[in-house]
Amino acid sequence: MPHLVVKDVVAGYGSGPDILTGLSLDVEEGKSYCIVGPNGAGKSTLLKAICGLVNIRNGTIDFEGETLLGLRADQVLQRGICFVPQDRSLFPDMTVRENLRMGGYILKDRNEVERRIDEVFEMFPILKERASQHAKTMSGGQQQQLLLGRALVLRPKVVMLDEPSLGLAPKVSKQIFDSMNQLKDAGITIIVVEQNARMGLGYCDWGCVLDLGKLVFEGASRTVLDDPRMAELYLGTRRTGSEK
Amino acid sequence: MTQAIQILIIGLTLGGVFALMASGLTLIFGVMGIVNLAHAAFMVAAAFISFFAYKGLGLDPIASIVLTMPVMFVVGLVVYRLFFARSIDDPKKRSVLVLVTFAMALVIEGTLGFFFSNIYRSTNPPYAYDAFLMGPFYLPKGQFYATLMSALILGALWAMLRFTRLGYAIRATTHNRTAAEVVGVNVDRVSMFVFGIGMALAGASGSMISFLFSFYPGKHWEWVAILLSLVVLGGMGSLLGALIGALSLSVISAFVNSAYGPTWSPVTFYLALFAILLIRPQGLLGKKPEL
Ligand SMILES: Nc1ncnc2c1ncn2[C@@H]1O[C@H](COP(=O)(O)OP(=O)(O)OP(=O)(O)O)[C@@H](O)[C@H]1O
Ligand SMILES: [Mg+2]
């Protein structure tokens, strides 16, 4: 049974054009989803729409049977959906530990947050080593681990990652995807946007292909990779992407 | 040498008050990305509150921060709701917000001028005309008390930013607005509180300048220019930078004052502003604050 249901969603920024143009997607609990598609397809916008950072103009988004529409970002977090944006959204001048504390910002119990930070340290020992270092002085891979760790402080049910491998060496990207799979094994639903379709799909159960603000097709990762429509989208037999 | 130390004392004790004045400006810029050109106009408005509380109720101007800070805090919340809340997240509207603050400065100046006319005023508690004598040095009591109070307020502000939940939220929003939103900080609420806190700091500054300087409604242009130079020197948005900028420029201007006379001391700030913008536009501590 799907626990996150996106239905006919139309969304855009400010008074600008529709970026998502009637997008539907069912997400099942405990599975991992890789979202691929050309630049400007609306992949990031979809994630932002789910977590309350973009206004929904039409359609519905339900999570565990309740609507997410009209909720602020912090209220979506309360429901257990965490988002790791594309642009390395750390707090550069805070220490690693302070960044993790910010991850537990919506929790009232400070001691609980410290306990959970210790859990995160178990999963990412490097963060413990660097606990009092400023986030901006960490390497790209370490920053990505910190972002993941920061999301985990909330013990989320769903983690959404936007291009976690951006700018990372292949070996480091693999580590990030391995950590991601660890989370999936712990029962967390994963939605990841990935430019490198081959790698992203290789790590996920299910592939969703977006173009021009719509879901073009989806399927088990392997079948998506081999689908001729993929080549069409990526090799560009026609103009793709909305206005940039 | 004795004279140099004397000038240093004067410069540093004024610098503390300048730091208080600049703190609200830089805090608001850090979180909202807006230069509030009405900051000094709000200070002058608060100075009027202190002035009338002193004349009418005999309330000591330093003690009158119990009046000016909460009043200006509430004014800040209201102003934020009315003028900024809906525009802050819209890049197109956002760019005109500086003009909105410019207009607010004009309106405040005009209103104060209409009711109280453009004459020089000053509260004159006894300590404003007294000094501590220590050997060859003297320390004006008014400046000393004002700087002491400024240090207290800035210390409290620092502790709030460092240790409270709201403080974490403010710093997070300053560093990276998107990231703050993503971890669940209600950045709109934070912006509103920061505007209120910034105005409360302007209120406290107003109480201090009510006896340190003489003021009239149009005086704020001079102060806002000085504050901008301090804040730009330290790095827009940086509280520590504002403190360093305030202390150093105020000492330099005290030396210029003693060497070339009082007409030239404000010019120090403007020249510094020019020089900084040419040489290191991001200021001493960069654009993003560190505190
Ligand atoms: N904050 C914003 N304000 C206005 N328009 C935006 C904003 N963010 C994205 N857009 C527009 O929305 C469209 C889709 O952007 P989005 O970031 O969702 O694409 P994407 O699929 O994630 O692309 P990429 O692979 O480049 O990350 C683009 O045309 C972009 O210009
Ligand atoms: Mg994107």
Image: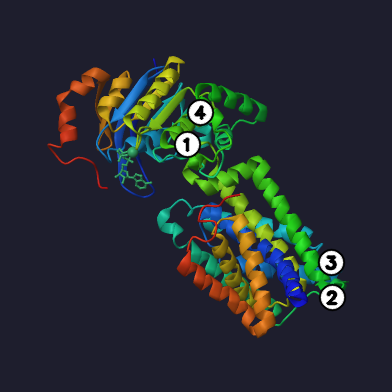
- Under mark 3, the amino acid is Asp
Q: Disc 3 marks which residue?
A: B60
Label 4 to label 2: alpha-carbon separation: 58 Å
Which image quarter is the N terminus of chain B in?
bottom right
Please state the horizontal and vertical placement of residue B198, each as a whole percent of the image: 63, 57
Question: What kind of colouring is applied to the model shown?
Answer: rainbow
Check disc 4: other Cα within 10 Å, few if <14, some if 14-19, many if 20+: few
Q: Are marks 4 and 2 in contact (CB under 8 Å)?
A: no
Task: Say what secondary structure mark 1 lies in.
Answer: loop
Q: Disc 1 marks which residue?
A: A70
Give the image quarter of residue B30. Answer: bottom right
Same-chain status of marks 4 and 1: yes
Q: Earlier in the sequence, mark 4 or mark 1?
A: 1
Residue lying at 77% horizontally and 72% vertically, measured from the top left: B211
Q: Earlier in the sequence, mark 3 or mark 2?
A: 3
The answer for which chain carries disc 1 is A
Label 4 to label 3: alpha-carbon separation: 56 Å
The answer for which chain carries disc 4 is A
Please state the horizontal and vertical placement of residue A70, each as a whole percent of the image: 47, 36
Question: Of discs 4 and 2, which sits in the foreground?
Answer: 2
